[in-house]
């Protein structure tokens, strides 16, 4: 049985070598000299020589079919967790074929990522082989966020804000590169869980979706981009919002959803427009001023938060379809909301967060309190540290940051 699997792997390895050498369209940075290419070894030989990747290698041998699915691209990138990364994740069963197959597929990027050729700065999204609908509704392949930091380390961000640092970069094999990481990638999960367990600044937006009956529809819709105002944005205009009818509020929320298009932060182009789910020819206008990106006049705060069905960008104000002609004032550091700020507005987690009473309760002690997000959203799983709000700058947080075990990631994937 084991020998059979090993033979299958060995049979696949020449395929990989061929995919690499016969492809006519080499994508830069696929620029190896013929001599370098002769020195590059096949995957099996490279993995066998990497002590810290023995767990990964044994999984690949146990599930050789994954390699058969490798597309005929100019190259692929295998994200290979170190033995320690596997040791640190628990509650999973290496003999669960469905689980391991989907997880390993999420660890294969379609295209070569050579960290030596990356420029420090904004993040990009890289497509993976994960397409199984039980695990993702990004139909062209779920994504991983790749960002090279100014200290030269490259960090991959996956579901629930999990950060995996590449600790041994650019290990070449005949089919592309292996990137050794210190933490397993977690396939992105649904908005409900992402907001509950990792990005608590999104609970007002999620609560508003529940209050208008949109939550499930939005979370099941394939290939979407969400512009989600943070809690403070809802707090600061809570009187204006509560004056809206339910159908007006639903329209406001639909104006924040871009259907049929997973748009990474790198895909927002100055002076272009987006077509929201609201329809009726509504548009959102994109402005870039320096490094700041604005939707109408709301500023992007945190880019590229991955969801099971697309990507979410956090913004600092609630958008209104009736104010689509507002633009940022270049002279001003912050832009005012487009809704009136009437009455006393208290922001921050110590103050009531609008709409959080609509969130379904997840533990005993329901009904949930409306006063703080912390008390109303006690997650049934370990809470992941939220990222700093300066994610655009790609702050270094070191190896200790990503604390999620794979068991947790799988547990919240909605399949257990
Ligand atoms: C992983 O765990 C095994 C079994 O507990 C142990 O023998 C091994 O040294 C650990 N490896 C690393 C890299 O932590
Ligand atoms: C994908 O969408 C379908 C509905 O079309 C839903 O049943 C499934 O749970 C979704 N998958 C994920 C991972 O959210
Ligand atoms: C936008 O304008 C329409 C028509 O005047 C109104 O019904 C709706 O409530 C307004 N929505 C918002 C968010 O102001
Ligand atoms: C999702 O997007 C991909 C490409 O971005 C496209 O090929 C696919 O048809 C889309 N699926 C749906 C259901 O919109
Ligand atoms: C974006 O477009 C506006 C209007 O054309 C222009 O003033 C601004 O400089 C552009 N921003 C960038 C970063 O190029
Ligand atoms: C495999 O893992 C999935 C996801 O965690 C779970 O739903 C399924 O029941 C597991 N199957 C077995 C045979 O343990």
Image (tube, rainbow, N blue to C red):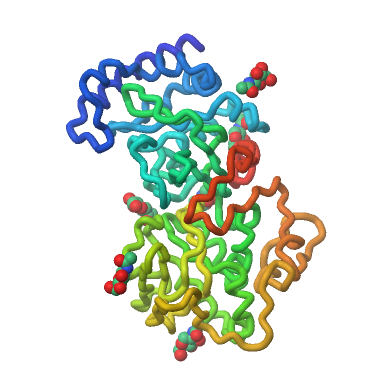
Q: Is residue 335 left or right of residue 374?
A: left
| Image x and y of residue 9, in percent | 40, 17
| Image x and y of residue 404, in percent | 63, 41
Q: Residue furthest top?
A: 3
Which residue does the image show at 40% across and 14% down from the upper left?
Answer: 45
Which residue does the image show at 49% across and 20% down from the upper left?
Answer: 57
| Image x and y of residue 321, in percent | 43, 79
Relative depth, front residue between 208 and 317: 317
Image quadrant for the C terminus? top right
Residue 272 shows up from this direction: no
Which residue does the image show at 43% across and 83% down from the upper left?
Answer: 323
Relative depth, front residue between 15 and 415: 15
Q: Is residue 177 left or right of residue 192?
A: left
User: Please, is residue 17 above or below residue 170 in the view?
Assistant: above
| Image x and y of residue 322, in percent | 43, 84
Residue 118 shows up from this direction: yes
Relative depth, front residue between 134 and 155: 155
């Amino acid at each position: 049985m084991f020998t059979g699997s090993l033979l299958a792997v060995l049979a696949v390895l020449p395929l990989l070598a061929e995919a690499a050498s016969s492809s006519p369209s080499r994508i830069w940075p696929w620029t190896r000299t013929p001599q370098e290419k002769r020195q590059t070894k096949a995957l099996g030989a490279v993995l066998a020589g990497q002590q810290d990747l023995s767990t990964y290698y044994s999984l690949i041998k146990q599930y050789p079919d994954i390699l058969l699915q490798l597309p005929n691209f100019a190259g692929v990138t295998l994200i290979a967790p170190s033995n320690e990364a596997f040791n640190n994740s628990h509650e999973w069963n290496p003999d669960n074929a469905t689980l391991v197959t989907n997880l390993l597929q999420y660890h294969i990027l379609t295209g070569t990522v050579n960290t030596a050729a990356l420029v420090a700065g904004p993040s990009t999204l890289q497509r993976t082989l994960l397409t199984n609908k039980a695990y993702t509704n990004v139909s062209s392949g779920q994504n991983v966020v790749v960002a090279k930091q100014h200290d030269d380390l490259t960090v991959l961000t996956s579901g629930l804000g999990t950060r995996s640092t590449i600790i041994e970069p650019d290990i070449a094999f005949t089919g592309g590169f292996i990137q050794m990481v210190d933490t397993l990638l977690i396939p992105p999960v649904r908005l409900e869980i992402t907001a509950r367990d990792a990005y608590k600044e999104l609970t007002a937006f999620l609560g508003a979706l529940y209050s208008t009956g949109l939550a499930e529809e939005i979370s099941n819709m394939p290939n979407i981009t969400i512009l989600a105002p943070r809690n403070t944005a809802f707090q600061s205009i809570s009187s204006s919002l509560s004056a809206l009818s339910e159908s007006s509020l639903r329209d406001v929320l639909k104006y924040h959803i871009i259907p049929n298009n997973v748009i990474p932060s790198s895909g927002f182009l100055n002076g272009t427009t987006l077509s929201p789910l609201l329809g009726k020819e509504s548009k959102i206008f994109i402005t870039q001023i320096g490094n700041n990106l604005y939707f109408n006049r709301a500023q992007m705060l945190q880019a590229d938060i991955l969801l099971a069905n697309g990507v979410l960008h956090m913004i600092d104000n609630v958008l209104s379809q009736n104010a689509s002609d507002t633009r940022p004032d270049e002279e001003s550091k912050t832009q005012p909301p487009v809704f009136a700020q009437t009455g006393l507005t208290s922001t921050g987690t110590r103050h009531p967060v609008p709409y959080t009473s609509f969130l379904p309760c997840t533990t005993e002690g329901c009904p949930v309190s409306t006063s703080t997000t912390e008390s109303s959203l006690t997650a049934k799983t370990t809470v992941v540290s939220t990222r700093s709000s300066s994610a655009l700058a790609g702050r270094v947080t070191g190896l200790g940051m990503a604390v999620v075990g794979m068991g947790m990631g799988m547990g919240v994937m909605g399949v257990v």
